Image: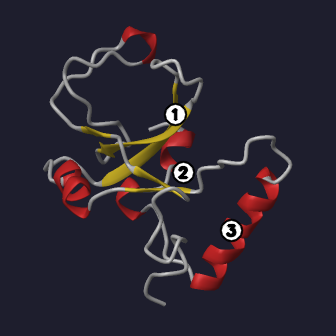
Amino acid sequence: MSDSQSKRPSIADAGGFISKERMQTLLTNYEKDHADQKATDIVKAMCFSKDKVLELLADDRAVGLRIYYGIHIDTDGDGIKEKKMVLVATDANGDDILPADVTLDGGIQAKSAGLILDDGLPCPNYCGGGGGGTGGGKD
């Protein structure tokens, strides 16, 4: 095992829960960092169905979740580029579990079936009933 592999954290243990205050600090920093952009429609978050996320993670090999950032280039002539978050399950080695017909960087073909989750609802357009993703939820 190489030195970099021995220092790699366990995918099954990745992530940590934070306080509401820490979350608010991170979100405020993000908004401030994007405040000087010309675009006024900054996507702050994406919401995905619990059932869809659980279906994605139902693969017996899944021990984690990877979220990729992407942009859907305008195809309907309105000039709008849609910001996307694409979710894939990962195995214990940190490899994405992808559909067999997906080719990865370098021409590597995925070996097994998997799901890819997209089309989350963007916030602020579709935040909670109170107009904000963090304002109307449980404390």
Q: How many angstroms separate mark 2 from mark 3 (CA)?
A: 27 Å
Q: How many angstroms separate mark 1 from mark 2 (CA)?
A: 29 Å
Q: What kind of residue is marked 2?
A: Lys
Q: Nearer the viewer, residue 81 or 21?
A: 81
- Helix, strand or loop at disc 3? helix
- 17 relative to 54 in the view: left or right: right
Q: Residue at x 74, y 42 (%)?
A: 39
- 63 relative to 9 in the view: left or right: left
State the image quarter where residue 138 is shown.
bottom left
Q: Position of residue 85 (x, y in %)?
A: 46, 43
Q: Which label was assigned to residue 26?
A: 3
The residue beneath circle 2 is: 7
Task: Check the image and report above or below for 76 versus 132.
Answer: above
- Helix, strand or loop at disc 2? loop
Q: How many angstroms separate mark 3 from mark 1 (CA)?
A: 21 Å
Q: Which label was assigned to residue 70?
A: 1
| 2 and 3 marks in contact (CB < 8 Å) | no
- Helix, strand or loop at disc 1? strand
Q: Position of residue 3 (x, y in %)?
A: 56, 41
| Mark 3 neighbour class, 10 Å CA radius: few under 14, some 14 to 19, many 20 or more | few
State the image quarter where residue 99 is shown.
top left
